[in-house]
Image: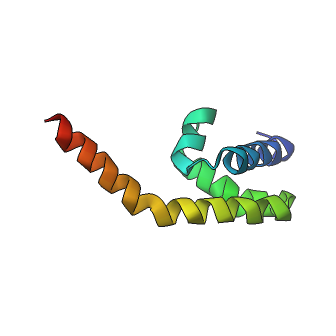
């Protein structure tokens, strides 16, 4: 993959995350790539192309990370309420 295509992918994924307040997992599913690829693109590639978008993505990902334990608890509650 050419460097320009990688930069375009990073910007597209970053925009998606910010617009939808998406998690890394949601972004990976949306674009059909691995979560590790999303992480790499957001942490290593995106800062090289768009500094402002990088800050916005970091804010969304940090918010998602802070809510992760709550989502996990709700998922467990749903799981056991079905049993």
Q: Give me the residue at 62% from left, 49% from top.
A: 38
Q: Give me the residue at 71% from left, 51% from top.
A: 18
Above or below, comparing residue 9 to residue 71 in the picture: above
Q: Position of residue 6 (x, y in %)?
A: 77, 45
Residue 60, image quadrant: bottom right
Q: Position of residue 62 (x, y in %)?
A: 58, 66
Residue 80, image quadrant: top left
Residue 82, image quadrant: top left
> Where does the C terminus fall, quadrant-wise?
top left
Q: Position of residue 23 (x, y in %)?
A: 56, 50
Depth check: give the residue in front, 75 or 48.
75
Q: Position of residue 64 (x, y in %)?
A: 54, 59
> Where does the N terminus fall, quadrant-wise?
top right
Q: For this view, does 22 lie left or right of residue 83?
A: right
Instruction: Kindly give the residue lying farthest to the front in the view shown.
Output: 81
Do we see residue 48 in this rendering? yes
Depth check: give the residue in front, 5 or 18.
18
Instruction: Kindly give the residue lying farthest to the left in the view shown.
Output: 83
Q: Give me the residue at 60% from left, 48% from top.
A: 37
Depth check: give the residue in front, 28 or 37.
28
């Amino acid at each position: 993959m050419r460097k320009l295509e990688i930069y375009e992918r990073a910007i597209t994924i970053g925009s998606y995350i910010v617009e939808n307040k998406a998690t890394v997992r949601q972004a990976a599913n949306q674009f059909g790539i691995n979560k590790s690829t999303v992480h790499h693109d957001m942490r290593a590639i995106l800062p090289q192309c768009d500094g402002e978008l990088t800050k916005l993505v970091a804010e969304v990902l940090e918010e998602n990370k802070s809510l992760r334990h709550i989502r996990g608890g709700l998922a467990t509650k749903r799981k056991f309420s079905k049993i």
